Image (cartoon, rainbow, N blue to C red):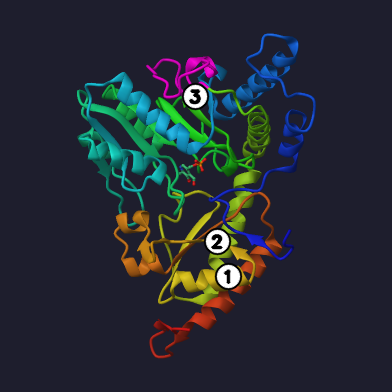
Amino acid sequence: MNDELIYLDNNATTRVHPEVCAAMEPFLAGDLYGNPSAGYRFGKQAKQALEQARQQVASLLEAQAEEIVFTSCGTESNHTAIESALRCFPERRHLVITAGEHSAVENPCAVLESRGYRVTRLGLDEQGLIDLEELESVVDSDDTALVSLIWANNETGVLTPIEEAARIVKEKGVLFHSDAVQAVGKLPVSLADCAVSMLSLSGHKLHATKGVGVLYVNRHIRFEPCLLGGGQEGGRRSGTENVAGIAGLGHATGLLQSALAKENHQQHLSRLRDCFEQTVISRVGNVLVNGHCEKRLPNTSNLCFEGVDAEGLLILLDNAGICCSPGSACSTGLVKPSRVLTAMGLSSARARSSVRFSVSMFTTEAEIDRAVDAVEQAILKLRVVLPSNGASVVRNT
Ligand code: PLP
């Protein structure tokens, strides 16, 4: 374990909460290894853990336990929502998403497009926001099988007005799914008065483990499963459940529910994020915030360091023990600017100079202070500041 490590990449994954580990332990190292589908008492103990977790997740979302389907991850939940909608409405050939979806929605939709489906991607403005009038104008009651909008963007943290969007889509008689993988656990996400038909979340983004996710399926909608087999999860997702992971997810959602109810969780996240962001901006200079400053997750800061190559910055920060993510992805030797930042109309240069920092409940003030110092030192190394106008260039070292 690296004592020097400062983990500011909590939108990528989160540390498993020690209480979550304790809640999982009886199903991993302990005696409770029974199959939850088995009819004898030993199996029923595992089944009971599943049902308790289902209740805990439902309670966090203000949903009904019967509406919670356990899956293996956020990606599976997203795929299932899309596939189910297409199977329920085979005559419909149109999907609506945003231009800023995670690849777990964008990529399956791109494949469907190559097979002849029509996919409308709602545009993002410079702040990363969608236009609800555009949404209303593109949904076709006869042809749209599903509208799927990301609740909170994983790169910028910018929020979609899901309640309003879901109302518009419901009035058109079309199914509505939201990828809420980044939102759940960082903000109150209530489905009590929300016209969402399906919603995805993922355990490892909220201090549970990797390999467990949820698809919320509103009890009044039509649904067709993707995985067929033993009929687990009420026939909606066959496959023996990851009992330990699910017990951990249930516990994590319980912890987050109490933290969110007291509002100190969001406050802790936004206080540290704002402190980081404001201090970096004032000490480093020529730093821009990507995305709407208010309408975003409390834990996410996506910053453009003008004139700096983010790849170089990430290397220096990694050497200093800081984990964060670039605004561009390197594939087959080419640095591709972020699809999300580009969709917001930001230049490739700006995307290539952008880095995402994301805090969690475990981030401390001392870590933020050290991270700010490390960012400042790295930027000093990478930039030659021209005194006349404050503009800067990259020193190619
Ligand atoms: N959706 C969003 C918005 C995400 O940020 C992620 C993960 O980064 C996913 C979906 C995929 O979740 P998982 O890693 O559980 O498959």
Binning the other alpha carbons within 10 Å of mark 2 as few (below 14), some (14 to 19) or many (20 upward) gives many
**Residue numbers of the magenta segment:** 217-238
Binning the other alpha carbons within 10 Å of mark 3 as few (below 14), some (14 to 19) or many (20 upward) gives few
Q: Residue lying farthest right?
A: 30
Specify the quadrant that holds the N terminus. Answer: bottom right
Q: Is residue 218 magenta?
A: yes
The CA span between labels 1 and 2 is 8 Å
Note whether ligand 1 is within 8 Å of mark 2: no
Note whether ligand 1 is within 8 Å of mark 3: no
Type of amino acid under label 3: Ala
Residue 351 in picture, x, y percent from top left? 38, 64
| Secondary structure of residue under mark 3 | loop
24 on left or right of 341:
right
Rendered residue at 45%/16% (across/down): 219
Query: Which circle's residue, 1 or 2, is located before the other in the chain?
Result: 1
Asked if the residue at tag 3 contacts the one at tag 2, i.e. Cβ–Cβ closer than 8 Å, the answer is no
Q: Nearer the viewer's eye, disc 2 or disc 3?
A: 2
Q: Quadrant of residue 26?
A: top right
Q: Nearer the viewer, residue 388 or 314?
A: 314
Q: Residue lying farthest bottom?
A: 388
The residue tagged 1 is 317
Query: Which circle's residue, 2 or 3, is located before the other in the chain?
Result: 3
Mark identifier at residue 324: 2
Residue 214 in picture, x, y percent from top left? 53, 30
Q: Is residue 156 above or below residue 5?
A: above
Rendered residue at 49%/80% (across/down): 382
Camera sees residue 313 = yes
The CA span between labels 1 and 3 is 43 Å
Magenta segment's dominant SS is loop
